[in-house]
Amino acid sequence: MCGKSEKTDAEWKAELTPMQYRVLRKAGTERAGTGELLHNKRTGTYTCAGCGADLFASDEKYDSGCGWPSFWKTSHASNVAERVDNGHGMRRTEVLCSNCGGHLGHVFEDGPQPTGQRFCINSASLGFEEE
Ligand code: FE
């Protein structure tokens, strides 16, 4: 990883799988329950599928039952950006990779303590590096 990724749309399209492209670059959402990493319980680091930035640690993942990989915290807060998303008639907080700007998912305030947060993240946005 070497600073901000500034790729053209065509470069992203060529580099990512169609699902990764739809989620990361077009803010799409994978179908609930389908993500490859949804039930992953191995120890390691979840990374951005677009640029490889570290996003979440495996001990920050929990089973929220919502159908997407869920995290109650990020130990890599400088790589995880948030912004207001008023799309689809809802007011939500979008979660993005701050390195490449890729869409990751949303964060909700109904997570477990001590943070009370639920980062609801598309599996397609994530890579996983096992320890
Ligand atoms: Fe990224």
Image (cartoon, rainbow, N blue to C red):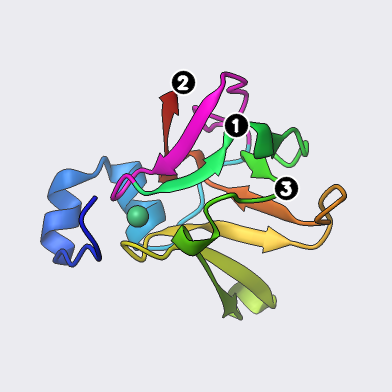
Q: Amino acid at mark 3?
A: Trp
Mark 3 and mark 2 in contact (Cβ < 8 Å)?
Answer: no
Q: CA distance from mark 1 to mark 2?
A: 10 Å
Q: Amino acid at mark 1?
A: Ser
The mark nearer the N terminus, 1 or 2, is: 1
Q: Earlier in the sequence, mark 3 or mark 1?
A: 1
Mark 2: few, some, or many residues within 10 Å (few <14, many ≥20)? few
Asked which quadrant contains residue 70, the reply is top right
Where disc 2 sits, the SS reads loop
Residue 117 falls within the magenta-colored stretch: no
| Mark 1 crowdedness (10 Å alpha carbons): few <14, some 14-19, many ≥20 | some
Residue at 30%, 49% (x, y): give it. Answer: 50
Residue sticking out furthest to the right: 113
Q: Quadrant of ligand 1?
A: bottom left
Identify the residue position indicated by label 1 in the image: 58
Q: Position of residue 59 (x, y in %)?
A: 66, 32
Identified by mark 2, the residue type is: Glu
Instruction: Give percent across and percent down for residue 120.
Output: 64, 50
Residue carrying label 3:
72
Whether residue 43 sits left or right of residue 3 in the image: it is right
* Left or right of 14 in this view: 50: right
Q: Nearer the viewer, mark 2 or mark 3?
A: 2
